[in-house]
Image (cartoon, rainbow, N blue to C red):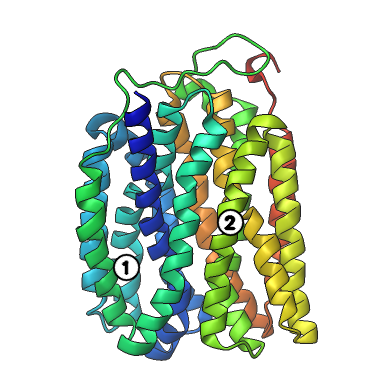
Amino acid sequence: MSRLAARALAIAAVTLAIQNGVVMAFAVIYLPLITEFGGSRAEVAMVQSAVFLVGGISGPLIGWAFDRLGPRLLLQAGALVAAAALALASRVHSLVALIAIYGVIGGLGLAAFGSQANMSIAALWYPRARGRAIAVADLGTGFGAFCFIPVAQILVTALGWRSTLLVWAALLIAIVVPLSAFQRLPDGATVRHRPTGGAARGWTLKAALGSAPFWWLVLMRFAAACAFPLMNVHMVAYAIGQGIHPATAATALGTVSLVSLAGRLTTGWLCDHIGRAPTLTVTYSSAALGIGCLALLGLTHWPGWLAFYVVLYGMAQGSSGIVGSARVADVFAGAAFGAIYGWMTLAVGPGEAIGAWLGGKIFDATGSYFGAFAVAVTALVIGVVAMWRVRADPLRS
């Protein structure tokens, strides 16, 4: 089983690398899209908001498909849908069409082979070391963004954003589709875990929806979904506005993901050793300090602040998914875990959509990103408070 488990984890990491690479690289085509379609930053950011929104609201559907079809067919179908959407999006000539094709159809395909499915695979193969297993699979998320973003900048500069979308589509067909044919779950897979402080209990979806821990975890996921996409979508545009060369700004965003490789491993280790809420407190504090450094870049124009941002914010990148997924499994272990997790994911899409859109809207209204940074830090604080409110044994609270 150890060899099969390691293979499943490796496939999950590669799949997440390509999936998140495509999602994160939107930051590079963001300004070219504004130039092409002539919309405001908020209007063009709606393309990525649609990706996030669809990814979130499709959570129950993806959970259902994961249980009924298995990971192989789900991941392959998602990659094919996303590839078709990217290819079609490369031919559109209106912002509305781009939102519909890239944002809605592409968002559904990308969500199908994203973190929900792959983190579930990691948790099922390693029930006794969830934090570390999820962190290892999630290394792909950071590594993919680190590779894709600088390469995307090169492609956009040399070929334009339309050809760049075709390259992404080709990668999905050439790598994700055939690789997913080897993905599987352990025989008789179910989420087995004894919640801290009591015996294992069975949860139904109805019971979970009526419990306080479910809604605190929903709030935590929503707050995180607002904060991190807001920063990731607008960081390159902000840095360029402060005089940073576009290639350097794209490299900085990619390096955030490189730093996050160490951050994800650290988060996974801390998650299993000091607990979920303390770990989130540490990582979100680091993210808030990093955002403060980015704000100082706008006040002093010293490039060193960008480097501090990359390190501090990068160490926190990805911590929400690792800590949140582990905590959901801790609390809601049982046969209904997939359904509960899928419904909880509904909070992510709206949060990401609002965060990506709000960053552009605040800039359009004020001519500055400082207000957006304040919103991101506030969301991080809310996320930490929500995580601390999740009781260890909710059926006794």
Type of amino acid under label 2? Ser
Closest to the observer: 33 or 327? 327
Give the residue drawn at x 52%, y 69%: 254
Residue bearing the label numbered 1: 102
Picture coordinates of residue 365 (x, y %)? Answer: 65, 81
Determine if residue 391 is in view: yes
Secondary structure under the numbered disc 1 in the rendered image: helix
Compared to residue 277, the image places residue 103 above or below, namely below
Compared to residue 83, the image places residue 166 above or below, namely below
| Local crowd size for mark 2, using a 10 Å CA cut-off: few (<14), some (14–19), many (≥20) | many
Picture coordinates of residue 96 (x, y %)? Answer: 33, 75
Type of amino acid under label 1? Tyr
Per the rendering, the mark at residue 260 is 2
Secondary structure under the numbered disc 2 in the rendered image: helix
Picture coordinates of residue 226 (x, y %)? Answer: 59, 57
Give the residue drawn at x 44%, y 39%: 119
